[in-house]
Image (spheres, rainbow, N blue to C red):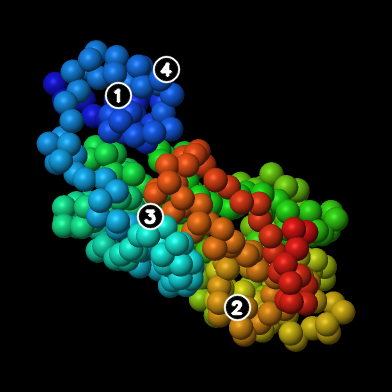
């Protein structure tokens, strides 16, 4: 028989893993009723806490660990600046690391936990969507917050509403034709965006690109502007695709160019091509929300921010 885990306790008690962990650690912000259900679940399952977790000092290391992925996005770096500022205000230190890809991620993160004994962990994709990493942290009673990750998985989440972002953009064309030039990446975010497009209107085309680079965007842009009725709106999910598309669109008179929007909040697009409408990530607010959840025991329910986009002239933001 497999040994019961804290996830089993949480499931039987009808609470989240984080709430179960707080109850077991006698931490605040857990109701008496929830604590009683957790105690009953522990007794029913015969749950025994990991010896490491029992001895792990919380709120004594004054460290928060942020784990980022290996992608090219500059979002984690920009988020980090705000996280450092918030940690200073809270009297904490932020440690940033990039675990290796592949099956060694769990072991690597375990080693960091052993050495640093952080108060909590901020996770970016792909670790934020890795069930093995999430299970290990829950088993060790380590609090964690996932940034822009799969809402179906366990744990506190800080994100924008990506499905609403796509829907909001498509509403701007007033029933006109739109195209979504997208990479063929898998994962919850890619699926969510494609599902939002398919649900929006029959006039929206899915345009899969063979790669996420400038050349693929340029090729799709040339194809779309050559059509008799080019779309009124082109949306893409990668900054390099957006720049390639813009190059092709500039062959047309300004009055005939479709609106071009990018769902990746990239610093390169904002600097090089401010005319591309960008989905803006409220990174400062997201960093504050994540750190407050970890260090101040505030509400651990998902925190979702409404999407905003840069204005058409690239000078401001609008909720559209």
Residue hosting label 2: 269
Question: For numbered disc 1, what is the local secondary structure?
Answer: helix
Q: Is residue 162 left or right of residue 39?
A: right
Q: Position of residue 80 (x, y in %)?
A: 43, 67
Q: Quadrant for the N terminus, please.
A: top left
- The residue carrying pointer 4 sits among few (fewer than 14), some (14 to 19) or many (20 or more) residues within 10 Å by Cα, namely few
Counting every numbered tag in the picture gives 4
User: Residue beneath label 1, please?
Assistant: 9
Answer with mark 1 or mark 4, whichever residue precedes in sequence: 1
The picture quadrant where one finds residue 275 is bottom right
Tell me how far mark 4 sits from mark 2, CA to CA.
Answer: 51 Å
The residue singled out by tag 4 in the image is: 33
Q: Say which of 213 and 288 sits in front.
A: 288
> Sequence order check: which comes first, mark 4 or mark 3?
4
Residue, disc 3: 122
Q: Nearer the viewer, residue 63 or 21?
A: 63
């Amino acid at each position: 028989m497999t040994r019961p885990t804290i996830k089993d306790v949480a499931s039987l008690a009808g609470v989240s893993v984080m709430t179960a962990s707080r109850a077991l650690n006698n931490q605040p912000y857990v109701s008496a009723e929830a604590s009683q259900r957790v105690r009953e679940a522990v007794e029913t399952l015969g749950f025994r806490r990991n010896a490491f977790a029992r001895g792990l000092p919380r709120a004594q290391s004054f460290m928060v660990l942020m784990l980022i992925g290996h992608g090219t996005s500059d979002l984690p770096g920009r988020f980090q600046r705000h996280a450092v500022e918030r940690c200073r205000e809270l009297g904490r230190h932020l440690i940033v690391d990039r675990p290796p890809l592949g099956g060694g991620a769990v072991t690597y993160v375990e080693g960091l936990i052993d050495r640093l004994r952080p108060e909590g962990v901020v996770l970016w994709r792909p670790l934020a969507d890795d069930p093995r990493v999430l299970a290990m942290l829950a088993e060790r009673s380590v609090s964690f917050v996932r940034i822009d990750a799969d809402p179906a998985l366990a744990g506190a989440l800080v994100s924008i509403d990506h499905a609403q972002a796509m829907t909001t953009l498509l509403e701007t064309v007033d029933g006109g034709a739109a195209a979504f030039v997208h990479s063929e990446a898998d994962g919850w975010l890619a699926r969510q965006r494609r599902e939002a497009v398919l649900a929006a209107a029959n006039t929206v085309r899915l345009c899969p690109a063979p790669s996420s680079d400038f050349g693929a965007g340029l090729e799709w842009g040339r194809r779309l502007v050559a059509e008799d009725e080019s779309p009124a709106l082109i949306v893409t999910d990668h900054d390099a695709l957006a720049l390639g598309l813009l190059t092709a669109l500039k062959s047309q008179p300004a009055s005939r160019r479709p609106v071009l929007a990018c769902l990746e909040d990239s610093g390169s697009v904002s600097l090089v091509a401010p005319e591309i409408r960008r989905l803006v990530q409220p990174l400062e607010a997201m960093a504050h929300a994540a750190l407050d959840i970890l260090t101040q025991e505030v509400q651990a329910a998902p925190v979702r921010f409404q999407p905003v986009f840069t204005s058409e002239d690239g000078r401001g933001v609008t909720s559209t």
